[in-house]
Amino acid sequence: MSKVCQLTGKRPISGNNVSHSHAKTKRRFIPNLIKKRFYIPETDEWVTLKISTSALRSINKLGIHEYLKKVEKGGVYTGIKL
């Protein structure tokens, strides 16, 4: 299962753990992803998406249909018929 948000495209990035002695070791910063089912009343269907929690906050603010239209206008292919 890939760790990529289907709507925002957030993915793991790499960085360093820095100890008290300032020794650096590699680490990964993994996005906070959840698997969530949404009901889209305009198309009368359920959709399961793996999204970041920041995308979920935006969906709660705008609504799923408006957010998907906004994302697709920005050039992200969601694979959902609107």
Image: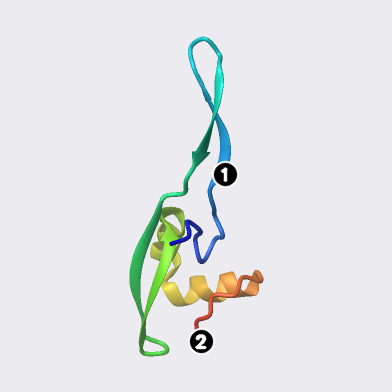
**Residue 64: x and y, percent?**
43, 73
**Residue 46: x and y, percent?**
34, 82
Is residue 34 or residue 64 the one in the foreground? 34
Question: Mark 2 Cα within 10 Å, few/some/many (few <14, many 20+)?
Answer: few
Question: Mark 1 Cα within 10 Å, few/some/many (few <14, many 20+)?
Answer: few
Q: What number of labels is visible?
A: 2
Mark 2 or mark 1, whichever is nearer to me? 1
> Quadrant location of residue 39?
bottom left
**Residue 20: x and y, percent?**
48, 12
Q: Which residue is mark 2?
A: 81
Distance, label 2 to label 1, CA atoms, is: 31 Å
Residue extending furthest toward the top: 21
Q: Which part of the image, by quadrant, shows the N terminus? A: bottom left
> Helix, strand or loop at disc 1?
strand
Residue at x 60%, y 75% (from the top left corner): 77
Is residue 50 or residue 63 the one in the foreground? 50
Is residue 14 or residue 10 the one in the foreground? 14
Q: Which residue is mark 1?
A: 13
Q: Amino acid at mark 2?
A: Lys
Residue at x 47%, y 56% (from the top left corner): 3
State left or right for residue 73 relative to residue 6.
right
Q: Amino acid at mark 1?
A: Ile
Q: Please tell me whether residue 21 is drawn above or below residue 39 in the rendered image.
A: above
Residue at x 47%, y 46% (from the top left corner): 30
Q: Please tell me whether residue 49 is drawn above or below residue 29 in the rendered image.
A: below
**Residue 80: x and y, percent?**
50, 82
For marks 2 and 1 on the same chain, the one whose residue lies earlier in the sequence:
1
> Quadrant location of residue 76?
bottom right
Q: Please tell me whether residue 24 is drawn above or below residue 80 in the rendered image.
A: above
Residue at x 56%, y 60% (from the top left corner): 9
